[in-house]
Amino acid sequence: MSASLSPRILQMGLNEGMSDAALAVVVLAAGQGTRMKSSVAKVLHTLAGVPLIGHVVATAQALEPAHLAVVVRHQRDDVAQAVSERAPEALIVDQDDVPGTGRALEVALEALPKSFAGDVVVVSGDVPLLDSDTLRAVIAHHRQQGAPATLISTVLADPTGYGRVVRDDSGHVVKVVEERDAAADEAAMSEVNAGAYVFQREPVALALGAIGTHNAQGEKYLTDVVESLAGGGQAVQAVRVEDSWLLEGINDKAQLSDVHARLNRMIVRGWQLAGVTIVDPSSCFIDVGVQLAEDVTIEPGVQLRGSTVIESGATIGPETTLLDTTVGAGAQVVRTHAEGAEIDAGARVGPFSYLRPGASIGEDGKVGAFVEIKNSTLKRGAKVPHLSYIGDAEIGEGTNIGAGAITANYDGVAKHRTTIGAHVKTGSHTVFVAPVEIGDGAYGAAGAVIRRSVPPGALAMSVSTQRNLEGWVEANRGGTPSADAASKASKGKK
Ligand code: UD1
Ligand code: MG
C-alpha cells in the first residue's frame, strides 16, 4: 500500500498527543483580501488542493486545543462551510462592522467560555505554511516566560507589506507598527511581525478593549495590543523564526504562486525521500491529499490532484493529470487526463486518453489513443485501444473493442447502458445503440450499427451488401482528375 513515511504537510488533520485544556486557537479569516482582486474570498483560494483556510485549520487542530474559533465575515457561509467540513468542532464567530484584526480577536474572545483563562494562539487564515511544531515551540517559550503576549517574527531582506517589530536599545519589544503607519526609521527595520501570536486571555482582552482605530486604515489593529501589553509588568516576547518562508502571508496571487512553488518542492521532496522517483520536480505538482507508494515513477509534466492514490511500480506521465483517481500496481498512464477514475494493476492507459468519472479500467486492461471513457467498467484484460467513446457501458473480461467504437448512450432524453460480455471482438467502427447487450464470445463485423442484442457466439453484421457501379466516375465526373485517373487505370488494364 501507500508509503507511511510522508512529509509533515501530508499529515494534515491527523491529531497526535494529548488535548491542551489550557489552550484556545483563534483563526482570523474574516478579511476580504482586496489585494487578491478576486470574487473568491482570499482564504478560499486553493494551495496544493486545499483552501488556505484548510491548511491553517489543520495546523490549529494539530495543537489539540480545548477551543478552536474561526472568525468569519467576508463570504461568511462559504468560509464557514470550508471550516466545518474539516473541523466540525470549530466555533464559527461572526465579526461585526468594526474592521481590523484586533476586532476579529475581540469577538472571538467574547465567544469563548467565560471560564477559559488559558493561552490563546492567534493565527491568520492567509499564512498557510506555519506549522504546528513551530507553534508548539512558541507556546512553550511563552509559558516558560510567563509573558502576556508572545509574537512570532522573522527577518526579511524585503519587509515590504509587513508590520515591523520595534525593539528598544536593550532588545525588548516595544511595539509593532504597520507599514502604512510607520515612520521612515521604523519602515527601515527588517524584523517583521508574522501575524501569529500567543496571548494570555485576560490581559489581551483588556488591552483590546482600550485600542482605537486611529491609523491609516481606520481599523482596530491587533498589533496595537503589543504596545499596551509591553508597558505592563511582564515583557512581551518575540520568537524569531529563521525559516521566514514558513511565515509568508498570502495577500495577492503572485504570493499565492510563490508559496505554492515552495510547498510543492517540499511535497515532492517528501515523496522522493519516501521512495518515489520524480524525474523533474519543477514540472510536477502534487496536492497534499495524494498518496504515493514506493517505486512509483513520475515522469515530467504530471499533476496529481485531490485524493489520487498510486500504488507501487506504476509509471505516470509524461504530461498527465490525475484528479481523485486510483492507479494500481505496475500500471502505466501516459499523456492522459483522468478524473474520478480507477485504473487497476498492470493496466495501460494512453497516450492521449480521457477518463471521466466512473471509468474503471480492469487489471491488465488497455485504453489507447484518443479514447474517452465515462461511467463504464472494463473488466480484467478488456481493451479499447483506438479512437473510441465508451459511456455507460460494461465490457467483459478479455474483450477487444475494435477501433472507432461509439456507444450511442443518449437518446436525447435519457442515458442507456451497453453491456458487452467476455471475450467479445467487435469490428472497426461499430456503433452500439444503447440499450443493447452483446453476449459472451460474440463477434462484430466492421462498420456494424448494433441496434439489437447479439446472442453469445454470434457474428453481428448490419451493413448492406456492397455494390460497385462500374464507370460511374467517368460518366458523372468527366474532366476531373479522378475521372482522368480512372480512365488511365482502365486503359492500362486493357
Ligand atoms: C497583518 C498584521 C501585520 C503582519 C501581517 C503578517 C495587523 C494589523 N497587521 O497584516 O503586522 O505583518 O499580518 O501576515 O494585524 N482579518 C480578519 N478581520 C479583519 C481583517 C483581517 O479576520 O477585519 C483576517 C484576514 O482574513 C487575514 C488576517 O486577518 O486572514 C490578516 O489580515 P490581513 O489583512 O491580511 O493583514 P495584513 O495586512 O497582512
Ligand atoms: Mg495578510
Image (cartoon, grey):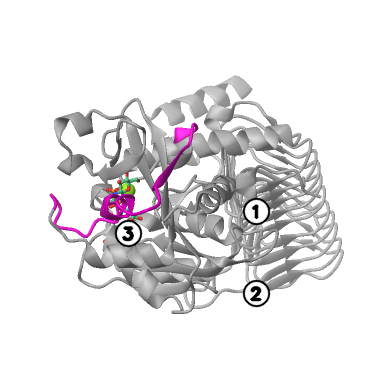
Q: Where does the C terminus fall, quadrant-wise?
A: top right
**Residue found at the very far top of the displayed protein:** 492
Residue for badge 2: 435
Please say if 84 is above or below 388: below
Q: Amino acid at mark 2?
A: Pro
Answer with mark 1 or mark 3, whichever residue precedes in sequence: 3
Q: Which residue corresponds to the image point at 26% horizontal and 39% vertical from the top-left?
A: 161
Left or right: residue 327 versus residue 189 is: right
SS category of the residue bearing label 2: loop
Please say if 348 is above or below 217: above
Q: Nearer the viewer, mark 1 or mark 3?
A: 3
Q: Amino acid at mark 1?
A: Thr
User: From which residue to which does the magenta span run?
Assistant: 215-244
Left or right: residue 339 versus residue 444 is: left
Please say if 289 is above or below 420: above
SS category of the residue bearing label 3: loop
C-alpha distance separating marks 1 and 2:
28 Å
Residue for badge 3: 41
